Structure formats: structure tokens, C-alpha cells
Image (cartoon, grey):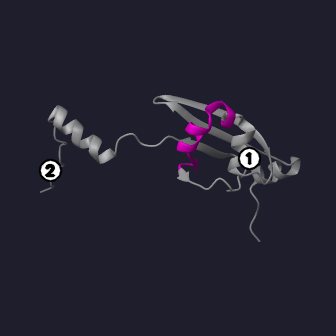
């Protein structure tokens, strides 16, 4: 039988889990909100409990992606104690294209490691 995590046992004892909700409205602006939710809450329930759904508006909310510790999830995913729920903005530029643009602008090539002899 697997032993239970003490944090999980403490969370289920009072019927609440602690979840952190993180989002960035703009580059370099991280905002975090700590929530206490009933055990068995979903990512969508956490978003509703935070009040962000009403604050951000439907258009912006539809463009965001839900993630749990950096991995994309469905809104009906169950959350666990001490999870970090993230709202991810869509990329504005493909990373490969951004690298090409920087190279054209700066003309600097990345240095390659010299092979060992």
C-alpha cells in the first residue's frame, strides 16, 4: 500500500485544497492568486472562484490556455493540493522566426563549441 503525502492528508482532513493561480497580463508582469477550494475542484471551477473570468472578459479568456505546472490541461481536470494553475497567453511570434529576425537585425551568429582534441 502506498503511503499518502502528508500535505494531501491535511488537505482532505479539512475538505479544502490550496491552489495557486498564475497569469501574466503583459510581458514581465506575473500575477499570482492563492485560492482555497473544495477537494475535487476542477481547473474551470478554480478560474470561476478567482473572479478572473469576469475581470478579463470573454474574448481574452477564450484566447488563453489553461496549464498545470506548464503542461496544457483541459478545463475539467481535477486539481490537487498545492497545484499551480497557469493561464497562458498565445505566442505572438514563432520562436524560430524570432531567432531569424534577431540574426538579420544583429548579424551575430551563436558561437559553436570547439570540438575537443
Image coords of residue 65 (percent x, y): 55, 47
Question: In this image, 111 relative to 55: left or right?
Answer: left
In which quadrant is the N terminus drawn? bottom right
- 85 and 49: which is toward the camera: 49
Residue at 78% in and 44% down: 37
Number of residues whose C-alpha sits closer than 10 Å to that of mark 2, classed few (under 14), some (14–19) or many (20 or more):
few
Mark 1 / mark 2, whichever is N-terminal: 1
Q: Which residues are magenta?
A: 53-70
Nearer to me, 107 or 76? 76
* Residue 102 lies in quadrant: top left
Residue nearest the observer in this picture, 104 or 82: 104
Find residue 87 and report its horizontal and vertical position in percent. Answer: 57, 42
Reply above or below: 6 against 25.
below
108 up-or-down from 12: above or below = above
- In this view, the mark in front (1 or 2): 1
Location of the C terminus (image quadrant) = bottom left
Query: In the depicted view, which residue is nearer to us: 85 or 82?
Result: 85
Asked whether 55 falls inside the magenta stretch, the response is: yes
The residue under label 2 is: 114
Name the residue rendered at 53%, 33% in the picture.
Answer: 24
Give x and y (percent) for residue 47: 69, 42
Relative horizontal placement of residue 3, taking residue 116 as reference (left or right): right
Name the residue that disc number 1 marks.
45
| Residue 108 x, y percent position in the rendering | 16, 36
Left-right relation of 16 to 101: right
Disc 1 and disc 2: Cα gap in Å?
Answer: 53 Å
Amino acid at each position: 500500500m502506498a503511503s499518502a503525502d502528508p500535505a494531501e492528508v491535511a488537505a482532505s482532513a479539512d475538505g479544502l485544497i490550496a491552489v495557486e493561480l498564475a497569469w501574466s497580463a503583459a510581458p514581465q508582469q506575473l500575477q499570482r492568486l492563492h485560492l482555497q477550494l473544495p477537494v475535487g475542484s476542477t481547473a474551470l471551477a478554480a478560474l470561476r472562484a478567482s473572479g478572473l473570468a469576469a475581470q478579463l472578459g470573454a474574448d481574452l479568456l477564450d484566447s488563453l490556455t489553461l496549464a498545470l505546472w506548464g503542461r496544457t490541461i483541459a478545463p475539467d481536470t481535477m486539481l490537487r493540493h498545492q497545484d499551480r494553475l497557469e493561464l497562458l497567453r498565445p505566442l505572438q511570434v514563432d520562436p524560430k522566426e524570432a531567432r531569424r529576425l534577431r540574426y538579420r537585425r544583429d548579424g551575430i551568429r551563436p558561437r559553436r563549441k570547439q570540438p575537443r582534441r
